[in-house]
Amino acid sequence: MPEDGQLNVNDRVLLHLFRFATDIAPEEYPPESTQAGIAVAVGISRTHVPRAVKGLVKDGLVSEITARVRGHERRMNVYVVTAEGIATSERLWQDALESSYDVTGEGVPPRMQGRDIEKLIGKKRAVAVVSQMRDGVVRLDENRRAPIRDMREAPPLEHFYGREPELRAMDAFMDSDAKMLVVLGNKGYGTTTLIRKFIESQDEEDVLWVSLRPNHSSKDLEQRLTEFGKKVSKQADGLKDVMGIENLLIVLDDYYTVTEDVVEFFTRLVESGGGAKIIVGTRQETPAYNRFYQRKHLEAGIVSELAIKGLDETSSMKLLGNDKIEKDALRRIMMITHGQPSVLRMLKENDYNGLKEGTVFTPEEIRYLLFLKDKPQ
């Protein structure tokens, strides 16, 4: 045990997870069992969580499993206290009951023993406030605010299928030390849709979504980020402060045709420190002169890249809306369209004009694809 009234990060994480320990595995685990949930609940940077849980797993106190999480469609990595972890948590809590803590709260003394805190608010909440204490202070009257999300420029989410490997890669980015994730995809391959889907699972983060336009200037972007940062933290007085905000996720989508000063602005973002994360949606065919990061950033783990291709056959069949399509017809569609989501969507909607104006297919090829997509087994 650290000195009286103090707990190290691993102990706080273990006590936090101890609150959700059950004899019978639930059908859905609470969001607080994920790395993002742990970071927010314990009040630490998300990038610090992997180190803590890795140590707890190594010591046999916590298990990492993949399971359903309340409020999320897909399975996620969650952390569960083992039998040994429960025993260790109980011992930790007994020590905590005998320790004294600096306390803030209306009508309470400035310093209290753990047992007095438990008597005042109950064991479950007492474990929570002790595991969440910051700077050695237990806050009895603190209500954690809901995440702030500015998604005004984000498109609605429609026709999303598959992409489980890509979503797992994005989860890995959030749990890594990387500052920026660059999602690359050709036009029509669903880069924006993928990022939009991923944001749905980030319910613990403050999120700002900016859709880039050709006339955006670096001043416009810096002002936008700073204004949002001030909503999240009163201490955010400039871009550097914004980049230092923990559990902040910034999406900068449709990076393609930009001015030189915007390229330089993005380079500044790459090299900025702090706990904020950035996801950039861009096209594979983005001109080389608009590249804002270098190989050294990739090798240093500052920037991660995720290149997306077309959908797999199963997801393509679902998007086409014909689960009884002839196998050979589906194979031919995949060969011609390469599983491009925007093309498959137009095929589903029988959008001949959209295919004619928005693709390089000839009228004969479009009629052939429309014939194939309705061909039964």
Image (tube, rainbow, N blue to C red):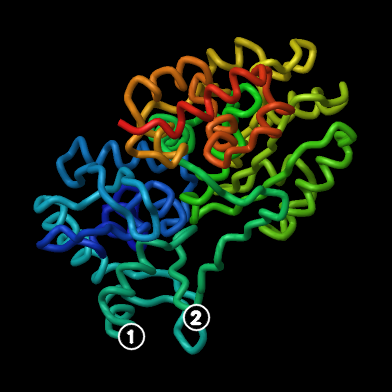
Q: Amino acid at mark 2?
A: Gly
Residue 207: x and y, percent? 62, 51
Residue lying at the far bottom of the rendered structure: 107
The residues tagged by marks 2 and 1 sit, at their Cα atoms, a distance apart of 12 Å
Mark 1 highlights which residue? 120
Instruction: Classify mark 1: helix, strand or loop.
Output: helix
- Under tag 2, what secondary structure? loop
Residue 21: x and y, percent?
Answer: 19, 61
> Would you call the spot at circle 1 few (<14 residues within 10 Å), some (14-19), or many (20 or more)?
few
Residue for point 19% across, 44% down: 63
- Residue contact between numbered discs 2 and 1, judged by CB atoms under 8 Å: no
The quarter of the picture where residue 347 lies is top right
| Residue that carries the numbered disc 2 in the rendered image | 105
Q: Residue at x 53, y 22 (%)?
A: 368
Amino acid of disc 1: Leu
Residue sitting nearer the eye, 323 or 156: 323
Q: Which mark is residue 204?
A: none
Q: Residue 132 or 135: which is nearer the viewer?
A: 132
